[in-house]
Image: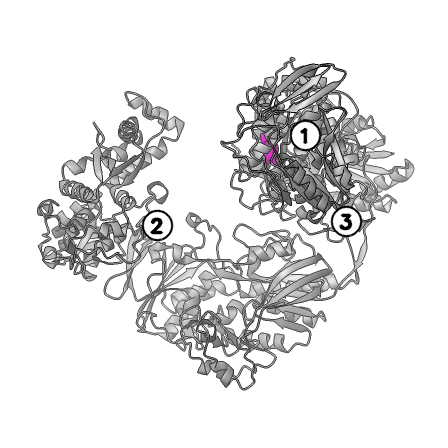
Amino acid sequence: MRIGVFVCHCGSNIAGTVDCAKVAEIAKNFPDVVYADDPMYTCAEPGQAAIEAAIHEHKLDGVVVASCSPRMHEATFRRTVERAGLNRYMFEMANIREHVSWIGKEQQANTNKSAELVEIAVAKLRNNRPLAAKTFDVTKKTLIVGGGVAGIQAALDCAEGGIPVILVERESTIGGKMAKLDKTFPTVDCSACILGPKMVDVAQHPGITLYACAEIEEVSGYVGNFSVKIRKRATYIDWEKCTGCGACSEKCPSKKTPDVFNEFTGTTTAINIPFPQAIPKKAVINAQYCRQFTKGKCGVCAKVCPAGAIDYAMQDSFVTEEVGCIIAATGYELMDWTIYQEYGGGRYPDVITSLQYERLLSASGPTGGHIVRPSDGREPQTIVFIQCVGSRDNSIGRPYCSGFCCMYTAKQAILTKDHLPQSRSYVFYMDIRTPGKMYDEFSRRAVEEYGVEYIRGRVSAVYPDGLGRYVVMGADTLLGEPVEIRADMVVLAVGIEAAKNAPALAEKLRISYDKYGFFMESHVKLKPVETNTAGVFLAGVCQGAKDIPASVAQGSAAAAKALALFARDKLENDPQTAQVDARRCVGCGKCIRCCPFGAITETEIRNEKKAQVIETVCQGCGLCTSTCPQGAVQLSHATDNQILAEVNALCR
Amino acid sequence: MPVMKDKELRIVGFLCNWCSYGGADTAGVARAEQPTDLRIIRVPCSGRVDPLFIVKALLSGADGVLVSGCHPRDCHYSSGNFYARRRLEVLKHFLPALGIDNARFEYTWVSASEGQRWQQVVTAFTRRIHTLGAAPGFEDAPLLMKTADMAPAPLRPLGTGKNAPLESLKQAIKEKLPDLACVIGWKQGYDDAHTTPLFAKKPEDVDELVWGPLNAANLAVYLPLFKGKKVGIVVKGCDSRSVVELLQENLVAREDVTIFALPCEGTLDMGRVNEKLGRYNVVGGIAHGATNITITTDGQEHDFSMAEYAQNKCRGCTEPEAVLSDVRMGDSPLVQGEAPVPQELALLDAMNLDERRSFWRTQMERCLRCYACRNACPMCVCRDYCISDSRDPHWMTQEAGVTQKLFFQTIHALHLAGRCTGCGECQRACPVGIPILGLRQHIARTVGELFDNYRAGIDPAAVPPLLGYEVEERNIREREWK
Amino acid sequence: MNYAYYPGCSAKGSSADYEKSTQAVCAVLGMNLVEIPGWNCCGSTPAHAVDTELSAALCSRNLDIAAQQGVEKLLTPCPSCLSNLRHTAKRMENPQFRARVDELLDNPAAPDFPGVTSVMQGMAAHCDANGIASFIRKDLGQLTLAPYYGCLMSRPADIMDFGDPENPTLMECLLAACGAKVLDFPLKTACCGASYGIPERTMTARLSARILRLATDMKADAIVAACPLCQMNLDLRQPQAAKEADAIFAMPVLYFTQIMGLAFGLSPDTLGLEKLRVSASALLDKLEPAPSISKTPVEGGQSCE
């Protein structure tokens, strides 16, 4: 080989503590090195031009640049060598800035270390091989998991962009948490009035296929060509026939069914449509409470259904969709606040969650929009709102802020005053976090116009006073005094957590999730929509706490990513993938078992089982290479021989 | 290139590209001053770090090796570091068996944003290696010869299998033979005192089948050769675990193999038997007693009691009956007591690090590098493609030095981690009698301790521990950096 | 069955009635409490507030005595003693701390200390609800009781191992097994202020009044305590609390062992009831002979543990 080495000064960034000329001089003695230089700024245009010139002049077939981190400029220099006619993988970098000149001051040690880093880069480069990307076709279709506002927005944007959409929703209706809200901050718009039209659009858009009561069963494939198996849960109602007339739930005798949509603030019938604006507006039977299932006889709904849609024998069914990308928009759930025994742990009927309170405020809720105490149906006079229940609390392992509680608490306090003008509201808070547009103004209004009393401090205990009211004991940390309030009702701003099945879905999608179950974006700042699995994007709270505008924005962003992906007819893979040497492979399948991406399959060559890498799926982690005992799978650009060359260069 | 004399030691770091390499960059950007000893090798994922790279570095003169990856759950490849955690933890336990201080190897997790943590890790690790000093080599360790003790009393009565229902078994094999390409068993070898593998294809071949304490060989080693064909195999309890392991690893299909089993009453340590027999011309006969056999050579009788001449592994054996079989005959023996620490492992346990280094140097100087250990191992399924004699990948040189030979033993041992059933064929095959089984037993013990008492070759459906992971490992704790 | 027992110093003075009733009830249950020889004060309040090591030395000596006796589990009735003993055992896991404490002792403390639990937990481990029900001789069905653990028994959770720190339920289980009506008493782990009884009398009165007021409002016949200091504070200082709250309280404050003793048909003398400042006579009037000395199993009959 003919290798050229360029030791960058990076102005004084490197040259300040590294004798770059000497490193270049030493490098000339390394095997196959025929040229070495120490330019001032290698990444600048003259520096890159010098590399190109040297490649031509000295007939180089490999280049090492010793400069900054490859995470900074590897892509830059790969393009440089490519312009000069080399394969972009015939290039290596030695990081002598972040890993040398910036972390030590002693020139002799730094110079020696830099020379060694160049030596291992040369040793690796001598084992490099030219690699070429492959192209493959794309299925121009998007699958969206979760029909909350983020998923709805993503679906509409994709469909408007001409890309067919499969929308999968776990519940029987789309709308998510937003559909349960009464009003939204900071405009106090009616939630159903602004979300409803979007939901209808989803139902009517010819480009959107909606599967409600459905969940993701299996995902295989890779960017451009995913195959997703969807489980359609048995609803016991033929939705083709159901007209959503509601006759069934009117006559259903099982009226003590917990009302999930109303956050258990009331009961409903075993067969029902969760709310009037539901999309699809179809009935579902809750088999746990339906008498036909629990007692084996009833059949009232089957008798009254004018469409003959009831089918008690219905089973779960499956459908498989081929799509090119997947957007996860699975949203959130409230954490289990009953671990807070000091707030009664769920034993006190009038200590409720903010989402339950939202249902009490809602005109379509169980009380028709009247605020009453669940215990006795009386109107409360004094209401205490406690913020950060399960947020920013390290003692229960939840250090994160749930983001939107400050705002909705202000909203609920304002609405309370609207509903019950005589009432008094208190809000216990830790900090008020209102950085959105018109947000702080809104929370100020709660204090200044609506007379909500904000008390900065935590509540230590809530307990019934034995006379029908509740004692709320807390601290006012601004006054430095304990406070005690007699309340009729306590509303907890319960912190959020990822949807219950989020980790399971993440594993199916092969994306990472944090220890709270929120999906990991590819880069916290610069890739907030992408994941580390190509072709899987994120929208909404499944990625981290955010309010409605942010969720909608991320839904649109995810749709933009999908549209950008589908703007091309063919995709190119990263050629740093694993390769199987079929001769060495004994077909034991250890690599298949370990591969985090399902990128290795079994094939048969001359009647023998062998492993085969699907290059377009392989992400290049190399787990298979370190798993295969006979070294039959090698990760291109990080082969055993390449790493061994580096080890050998260092340890001899 | 030599390290800077008296100032630096040779420390190698393997950093995953996405988190830890980025963390080291972040430390650099923050100008977080660090010792200069460490040399970083960038790998895509901590899961890419084959533990053998680490051993290779440590045997080739590295004074310390540090692996760093993304925090568990944050893996760029979603689960690479979970696998790495298991494999590197096993390595951490294994290094002392070779005589290498495992403080010289550490693995940890540093995210791309944790520049400060990276500084701490490098500083603490470098300080640790400087406290330990330059790593002592193997070549110059003083010579030390030690041998394993004989195993204690057996956990069940040992015998000669004289009353085993061999004839019924032959009948059963004959019945199945028409459906099988062949049945693997033992037959008399070059004389009455030795057996050799039998590959019975015709009914009359089956009549050659023998059963008894001379059947020491583990015939499972031949099974992968018949991959794709329907075969039968006669097994002892220990052999059956090798068969199970082959099934588990997809190297033999369950429907292709018919397992014939008799309860084993122990096998002879043929090394010691041959030693006692000495040189002879003719075997005059062999007589099986209930608990001993008598071999007559050149007119002279030699008595071998099972109690004295059984293989060590037979004394500690808790599975004289096959763990998996299709045709099983004979009475179940009663096994009493817990398996003791195997003798070869006890020998290693009794030594300190310096002594182990001396011990392995001494033993490896005797090693002929004949690879008999590998060829006898039923789990060495790579066969012609063993990485010890390939150039791509090129793990080993052809030099005959102590470290090369020990590195081969490490390759074998680590490749057997979670797979070795302890059948001992490697050691039995060694022509110079190196107690190499100890290394495999050491890893098997570690695997058991770390992964819920896992034992290889028991359950064909089990997920081998190093091919799986748990998000929260019960027995692996993150080590702190201070 | 013998149990190693550390009474703590209040058992021999201010809470002699707790001690008396504990001994009597345990005797009925078949628990023989054996005092460890030569025990000393656990260092509660004064020592632990001033000097952690001195406090730990006092406790270590007791734990060491128990360890020398070969005791595996040590029972103590007093939450404060329990807290100090358990804290000490935890702190002594730190070798540096242990070295400093050992310097204060005549001989270095035993390397392993026995586990310490409350007598209440000891009872629950000894017999299940059915077992307790089988000893009932008096019907407590007319009694409404407010269980009150005090602030120490369940906190801090990782040290005390007494169930949920905010909502322990062990005493409820025992009292229910005895046939009484047990309130879900929200202030069961609230502080009564006893340890500030001398320097901050008003504050103590205010804190005690809160508990007494709630028990009164919830129509409890008695507060049932498990801590000598709480019992003394709520009983003895009831007038002070009443004055502070501008209310009238007449709330008997009994130990849970006294209630159990009553259920088992033991005499008020045996249980030391005469020592109460707020008389329990109204309570005694509500007791009736058990309908039959029933062996009917308590619902569920499950263990209280």
Give the residue type at disc 3. Gln
Residue at image point 30% right, 70% down: A381
Amino acid type at circle 1 is Asn
Specify whether residue B91 is painted magenta.
yes
Instruction: Out of A8 and A364, give the one closest to the viewer.
Output: A364
Within 10 Å of disc 2 (Cα), the crowding (few <14, some 14-19, many 20+) is some
Task: Classify mark 1: helix, strand or loop.
Answer: loop
x and y percentages locating residue A140 in the rendered image: 74, 66
- Give the label, 1 or 3, closer to the camera: 1
State left or right for residue C74 relative to residue B206: left
Count of marks overlaid on the render: 3
Q: Nearer the viewer, mark 3 or mark 2?
A: 3
CA distance separating discs 1 and 3? 40 Å
Q: Is residue A7 something one can see in this rendering? A: no
Segment tinted magenta in the rendering: B88-93
Q: Amino acid at mark 2?
A: Asp
Residue B434: horizontal and vertical position, in percent? Answer: 67, 21
Q: Which residue is mark 3?
A: A612
Quarter of the image holding residue B31? top right
The correct choice, above or below, for B233 with respect to A375 in the image is above
According to the image, label 2 marks what residue?
C164
What's the residue at 66%, 36% (across, down)? Answer: B166
Residue bearing mark 1: B215
Q: Nearer the viewer, mark 2 or mark 1?
A: 1
Distance from disc 3 to disc 2, alpha carbons, whole Å, reads 54 Å
**Element at badge 2?**
loop
Few, some or many residues within 10 Å of mark 1 (<14, 14–19, 20+): many
Q: The residue marked by circle 2 belongs to what chain?
A: C
Crowd rating for badge 3 (residues with CA inside 10 Å; few <14, some 14–19, many 20+): many
